[in-house]
Image (cartoon, rainbow, N blue to C red):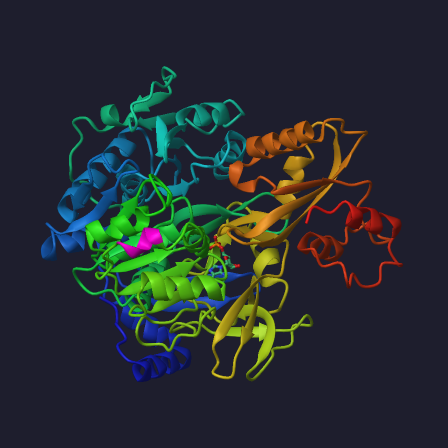
């Protein structure tokens, strides 16, 4: 096990050492894992190409560290504790020994289907244990998983399958979410009808039991695929820098990009941060409410906790089903010790009223966590007082898909808390703030764009199939720095507060959505000529989506038009990207070079039109008043 920090002084000393001697520090952490061959060099890097490699020459398989090494010490401990959507269905408890067997069995099945080291496997699945099993089975044989959140549409799924050139898709009949079952397999069928020629096989898990069409010669039931397969499977030993997974995420331009993480560094960093941030103790029941379709689920439902030998709770359902007391009922029944969720869920449950949390016995809770978006002070206080009863520290963890693991966060019960602050960098993490000219802002009480000056083991290695895009997106804005896309503030104690995105990415309910993607989708709706999308403050979702739309003629029935736009966005991306507000406008404010002035549109969406700045230099200043008068605020 990696080092576990116990006091603030120790944190300070470890941090100082990790900056002075990063290679020595990370080599010590890495040495606690099972390797087939030690590394020759700890780190090689430059942020210009960029080129980052950790534990060079080392050979391993991450799943041996998630599974095999625990068979000696905790074979009968529950690894995966699964809570179904329907509270009347049976909870599943899968021990480390059982999980090992199930992963190996599916790994053998994948091999039998022709999946080889380096092949991409797309997982489009509900939150059932088989999703975690499929993730690990891919890793076991050196294949690359690309999990796509099951809320994405067929078009979005097809884009991701094509970009990754996936050979196999693993899916399920349907997804039980709240009161309804949502079709999953038919979405895959639709995606595959859009020219995903790389796909040779679809493996289908029988989950809800809903009837689904099977395509002969292509589709195969999971239970048939694993039948008769052995429950042991020698792990494919890979290079430290062998690709572990691709995860698509939105940026400010173009289609989502496939962020690439690799076996060695990702393993070391997720285990280390899991144990230190949450101060995990053996025997704890740990629950992260994210979906495995996002990075939080990858790093802190599957890999981090399993690497640390923890019991990780996986929840199939939604926070409000059958009622808004569901989270607290689950915490009480499973005696959860560490609970990790998103601000949007906290705000939604807070709005549902205190009665849902009041009657519950939450004494098992020791640590609370939040992730995905800035948490407002009111939600922070409610979480601290009503859920944690002022006993439990809140770890406000800041990180990104690209960072693989938590970078800035309190260590539970060690770092002093400050509401809305992610506080201090973890060991090995060297943040800085820069101004628009790239000058580093020194000292306390400064605000700027958040960058990282030095690599940590789980930094993204590339964007799949397009390394130049990786360079342009993250490493080109400021020389020799990784740029996060976030703005942040540093206080007089060196603590960081994350303010939010400074690029054209909006954060809706903790989900990253690119404005360009939504605009592209809206532009496909009937009658639409052009659109511009901005975020605005939303009381539950954090940010809502505000769309300004130019149409080719009179829209007629406005509500039918809006519905058509919503349907188009749902078809092109998925329901999570649906605009909250759609305003039909005669034009969009543009500069003389034709650039849309989003700053003005953002102000109008926020309902703050007192100071729009100088609009006289616009190509079409007259539209501003027209937009203002029709604003939906
Ligand atoms: C935002 C999620 C404030 C931020 C792990 C970042 C946060 C983006 C926090 C990454 C936090 C994440 N406080 N903002 N604690 N955590 N963010 O890739 O804008 O889905 O850039 O990764 O979420 O979102 P992603």
Asked if residue 283 lies left or right of residue 183, the reply is left
Instruction: Report whether residue 533 is seen.
Output: yes
| Above or below: residue 201 compared with residue 499 | above
User: Which image quarter: residue 106?
Assistant: top left
Please tell me in which quadrant of the rendered image residue 15 appears. Answer: bottom left
Q: How many numbered badges does the structure rendering display?
A: 0
Q: Residue at position x 78%, y 41% from top?
A: 585
Q: Residue at the spot x=49%, y=36% of the render?
A: 152
* Residue 623 image position (x, y, % from top left): 84, 47
Q: Quadrant of residue 396?
A: bottom left
Which residue is at the far top?
Answer: 216
Q: Is residue 61 visible?
A: no
User: Which residue corresponds to the image point at 38% horizontal and 62% vertical from the top-left?
Assistant: 383
Principal secondary structure, stretch drawn in magenta? helix
List x then y, in percent, for residue 161: 48, 35
**Viewer-proximal residue, 234 or 282?**
282
Report the front residue among 428 and 520.
Answer: 520
**Residue 155 in the image: x percent, y percent?**
54, 31
Q: Is residue 206 left or right of residue 125?
A: left
- In front of the other: 330 or 228: 330
Quadrant for the N terminus in the image: bottom left
Percent across and percent down for residue 554 are 80, 29
Is 135 on the left-hand or right-hand side of 351?
left
Instruction: Give, as a single range, the part of the protein colored magenta.
Output: 355-359
Magenta includes 356?
A: yes
| Residue 51, magenta (yes or no) | no
């Amino acid at each position: 096990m990696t080092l576990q920090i116990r006091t603030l002084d120790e944190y300070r000393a470890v941090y100082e050492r990790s900056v002075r001697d990063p290679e020595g520090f990370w080599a010590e952490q890495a040495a606690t894992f099972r390797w087939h061959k030690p590394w020759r060099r700890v780190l090689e890097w430059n942020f210009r190409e960029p080129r980052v490699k950790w534990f060079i020459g080392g050979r391993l398989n991450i799943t041996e560290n998630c599974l095999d090494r625990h068979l000696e010490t905790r074979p009968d401990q529950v690894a995966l504790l699964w809570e179904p959507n329907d509270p009347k269905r049976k909870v599943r408890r899968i021990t480390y020994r059982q999980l090992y067997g199930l992963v190996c069995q599916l790994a053998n099945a994948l091999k039998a289907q022709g999946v080889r080291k380096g092949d991409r496997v797309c997982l489009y699945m509900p939150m059932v244990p088989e999703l975690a099993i499929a993730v690990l089975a891919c890793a076991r044989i050196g294949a690359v998983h690309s999990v796509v959140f099951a809320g994405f549409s067929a078009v979005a799924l097809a884009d991701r399958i094509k970009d990754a050139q996936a050979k196999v898709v693993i899916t399920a009949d349907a997804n039980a979410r709240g009161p309804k079952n949502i079709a999953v397999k038919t979405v895959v069928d639709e995606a595959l009808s859009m020219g995903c020629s790389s796909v040779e096989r679809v493996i289908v898990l029988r989950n809800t039991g809903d009837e689904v069409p099977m395509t002969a010669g292509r589709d195969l039931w999971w239970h048939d695929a694993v039948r008769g397969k052995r429950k042991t499977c020698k792990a494919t030993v890979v290079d430290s820098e062998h690709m572990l997974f691709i995860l698509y995420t939105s940026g400010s331009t173009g289609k989502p990009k496939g962020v690439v993480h690799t076996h060695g560094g990702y393993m070391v960093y997720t285990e280390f941060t899991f144990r230190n941030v949450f101060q995990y103790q053996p025997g704890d029941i740990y629950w992260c409410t994210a979906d495995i379709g996002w990075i939080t689920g990858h790093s802190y439902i599957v890999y981090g906790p399993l690497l640390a030998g923890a019991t990780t709770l996986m929840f199939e359902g939604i926070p409000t089903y059958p009622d808004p007391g569901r989270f607290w009922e689950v915490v009480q029944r499973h005696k959860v010790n560490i609970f990790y969720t998103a601000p949007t869920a906290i705000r939604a449950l807070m709005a549902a009223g205190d009665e849902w949390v009041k009657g519950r016995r939450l004494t098992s809770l020791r640590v609370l966590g939040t992730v995905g978006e800035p948490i407002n002070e009111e939600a922070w206080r409610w979480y601290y007082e009503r859920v944690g009863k002022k006993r439990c520290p809140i770890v406000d963890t800041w990180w990104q898909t690209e960072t693989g693991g938590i970078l800035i966060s309190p260590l539970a019960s060690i770092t002093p808390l400050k509401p809305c602050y992610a506080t201090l960098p973890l060991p090995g993490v060297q943040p800085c703030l820069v101004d628009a000219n790239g000058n580093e802002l020194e000292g306390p009480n400064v605000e700027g764009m958040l960058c990282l000056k030095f690599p940590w083991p789980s930094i993204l290695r590339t964007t799949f199939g397009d390394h130049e895009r990786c360079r342009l997106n993250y490493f080109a804005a400021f020389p020799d720095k990784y740029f996060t896309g976030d703005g942040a503030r540093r206080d007089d104690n060196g603590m960081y507060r994350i303010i939010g995105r400074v690029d054209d990415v909006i954060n809706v309910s903790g989900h990253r959505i690119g404005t360009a993607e939504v605009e592209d989708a809206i532009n496909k709706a009937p009658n639409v000529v052009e659109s511009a999308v901005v975020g605005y403050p939303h009381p539950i979702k954090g940010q809502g989506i505000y769309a300004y739309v130019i149409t080719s003629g009179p829209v007629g029935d406005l509500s039918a038009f809006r519905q058509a736009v919503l349907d188009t966005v749902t078809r092109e991306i998925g329901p999570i990207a649906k605009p909250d507000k759609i305003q039909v406008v005669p034009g969009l404010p543009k500069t003389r070079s034709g650039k849309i002035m989003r700053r003005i549109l953002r102000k109008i969406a926020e309902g703050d039109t007192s100071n729009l700045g100088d609009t006289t230099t616009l190509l079409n200043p007259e539209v501003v008043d027209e937009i203002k008068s029709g604003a939906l605020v």
